[in-house]
Image (cartoon, coloured by chain):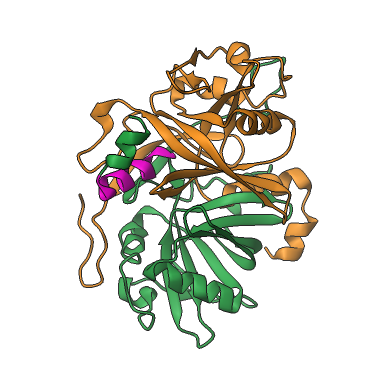
Chain colours: A orange, B green
Amino acid sequence: MNKEELLAMETRYRANLINSLGGFKSVVLIGTRDTNGLENLSIFSSLFHLGANPALCGLIVRPDVSERHTLENIIETGSYTINHLHKDIAVKAHQTSARYTKEQSEFEQVGLTPLYKEGIYAPFVHESVVRFACEFREMVPLQINGTILVIGEIVHIDIPSEIIAESGFVNIEAAGTLTCSGLDSYHTTQKLVQLSYAKPDQWPREI
Amino acid sequence: MNKEELLAMETRYRANLINSLGGFKSVVLIGTRDTNGLENLSIFSSLFHLGANPALCGLIVRPDVSERHTLENIIETGSYTINHLHKDIAVKAHQTSARYTKEQSEFEQVGLTPLYKEGIYAPFVHESVVRFACEFREMVPLQINGTILVIGEIVHIDIPSEIIAESGFVNIEAAGTLTCSGLDSYHTTQKLVQLSYAKPDQWPREI
């Protein structure tokens, strides 16, 4: 299909189609609270790796109702947590995308447990296996479509040591971490192959 | 682990660790060519959905050798293609990350076939099942770590019609699309559940 056909599509149809195109996505729960201590938890499929030194991740936020609470809390307090999904919490995680009011904690509404760690203002998700905390660094408004790129530095990591390989690679599949496609489809994974660093004069080997 | 432990890590260990943390990632082959017609093909795990209206995707590019050829061609010609991976081309796709010279076409070096479509300057990957083309829209330099956010508009989509649902959702799992974790681990997926739009007063149902 070409650009004219894309423009002519019904809005929801195009949203489903375009959201599927980019491939499988990271899907995480972001925990925050405001300066009064009101907790918020929201599912995002727009987190991405930005760099390892310093350790940075990016997040695309749409300035609509449910995502705005997260954004406001991040800016207000500078603190947020990223919590991976696994199959036992997938439905609860999805339900955090409902438009609850700011006074309603999604932790309570969907039945997940906030977990606090010393020195980190935002709540983690107790039920998650892989989780980390970020400090807000920068906000880059993207004028092309009114979304906002939020950049955070990873300041605390909480993963079971048995899934961290000698190389530093984290076996998130062993932790049951899910991936998603489109707006609403959740998937487990099965490792196909891990490959050595590619060099021009030889084929990569399985590692 | 805390920020001090992160900063003290050996560079390669930290790269592996931090690259795993963000969760499963999209992994695609990006096809370009320069104004002389020299083809380039490079694997990226930093593509993300940016918006459906207009249909936009973002790509984080590191200004190092292998990714620079892609970036130069995108800026020079405004055209690039995004091609999903499946298991039969995973090793070849990985091999495109080797540091070939600008004169060497990765298509030839790894054994993939360039495919041209009317009106699109950049080459697609013949062996891919899900693929689309973008027009370069904007480049946002991220000063925090020297990476560059490349924003493109989706102008052409090429997917088998039988994997597009009535809703517009594309069953990329049926196409065999892979996901990756860390720097070098490739995975197939297995659908867990697809859930209805979340509303505050009811649990989502399986769709």
For this view, does B170 lie left or right of residue A14?
Answer: left
Of residues B201 and A109, the one drawn nearer to the viewer in this rendering: A109
Q: Which span is picked out in magenta?
A: B10-22
The percent position of residue A46, horizontal first and vertical second, equals 57, 42
Whether residue A183 is visible, yes or no, is yes
Of residues B121 and B77, the one drawn nearer to the viewer in this rendering: B77
The percent position of residue B74, horizontal first and vertical second, equals 55, 72
Q: Residue at x 51, y 40 (%)?
A: A152
Q: Residue furthest bottom?
A: B36
Q: Is residue A131 above or below residue A201?
A: above
Q: Residue at x 58, y 45 (%)?
A: A138
Q: Magenta includes A19?
A: no
The percent position of residue A158, horizontal first and vertical second, equals 36, 26
Classify the position of the N terminus of chain A by image quarter: bottom right
Q: How many badges with numbers are in the image?
A: 0
Q: Is residue A149 above or below residue B153?
A: above
Predominant SS along the magenta part:
helix
Of residues A186 and A60, the one drawn nearer to the viewer in this rendering: A60
Q: Magenta includes B21?
A: yes
- The picture quadrant where one finds residue A62 is top right
Of residues B136 and A18, the one drawn nearer to the viewer in this rendering: B136
Q: Residue at x 72, y 54 (%)?
A: A143
Q: Is residue A127 above or below residue A151?
A: above
Whether residue B121 is visible, yes or no, is no
The percent position of residue A201, horizontal first and vertical second, equals 21, 72
Q: Residue at x 59, y 78 (%)?
A: B77
